[in-house]
Image: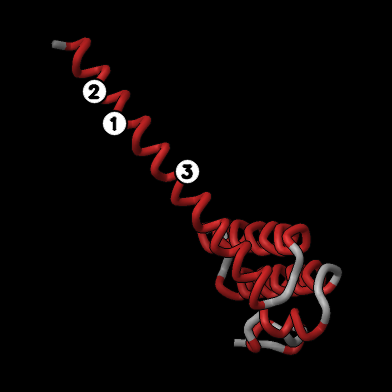
């Protein structure tokens, strides 16, 4: 009985992990297709853009989870992350492509932004 339970649990865990990996792959493919078609980038540049965006999202997630920083410190670091992301994207895409990728609120330099 114990052995059957362990095998069942392992099977469910494996199936869940596989499903999550497939969903992630599908989302990545969907993002890649959007960027390739709507922003008119080749697959290589689209992959570079996705990497920049994913790195940015992960850094923002880490920043927002940091309880040691005040709101003002978080805002300052967030502004630096936006500037870093924009700088990296501008190395990959043209100005018109950049406008399609980046929301208007994140296009200007964040040096002058305050909330």
First in sequence: mark 3 or mark 1? 1
Determine the secondary structure under disc 1.
helix
Residue most toward the left?
1
Q: CA distance from mark 3 to mark 1?
A: 14 Å
Q: Are marks 3 and 2 in contact (CB under 8 Å)?
A: no
Residue receiving disc 1: 12
Res. 107 image quadrant = bottom right
Q: Secondary structure at mark 3?
A: helix
Indicate which disc, 3 or 2, sits on the residue closer to the N terminus.
2
Q: Is residue 6 above or below residue 85?
A: above
Q: How many marks?
A: 3
Relative placement, left or right, of 45 versus 67 is right
Residue depicted at x 58% and y 64%: 31
Seen from the viewer's position, the closer of residues 85 and 19 is: 19
Per the model, the C-alpha gap separating discs 3 and 2 is: 20 Å
Density class for disc 2 (Cα within 10 Å; few <14, some 14-19, many ≥20) is few
> Between 35 and 10, which is closer to the camera in this rendering?
35
Residue 85 badge: none
Q: Which mark is residue 21?
A: 3
Write down the residue under mark 2: 8
Q: Position of residue 95 (x, y in %)?
A: 81, 84
Is the residue 19 above or below the residue 51 in the image? above
Mark 2 to mark 1 CA distance (whole Å): 6 Å
């Amino acid at each position: 009985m114990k052995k059957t339970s362990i095998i069942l649990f392992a099977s469910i865990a494996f199936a869940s992990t596989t499903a999550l990996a497939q969903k992630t792959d599908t989302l990545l493919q969907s993002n890649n297709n959007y960027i390739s078609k709507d922003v008119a980038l080749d697959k290589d540049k689209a992959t570079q853009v996705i990497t920049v965006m994913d790195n940015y999202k992960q850094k923002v997630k880490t920043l927002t989870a940091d309880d040691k920083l005040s709101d003002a410190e978080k805002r300052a670091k967030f502004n630096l992350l936006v500037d870093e992301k924009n700088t990296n994207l501008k190395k990959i895409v043209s100005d018109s492509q950049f406008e399609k990728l980046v929301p208007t609120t994140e296009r200007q330099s964040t040096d002058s932004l305050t909330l």
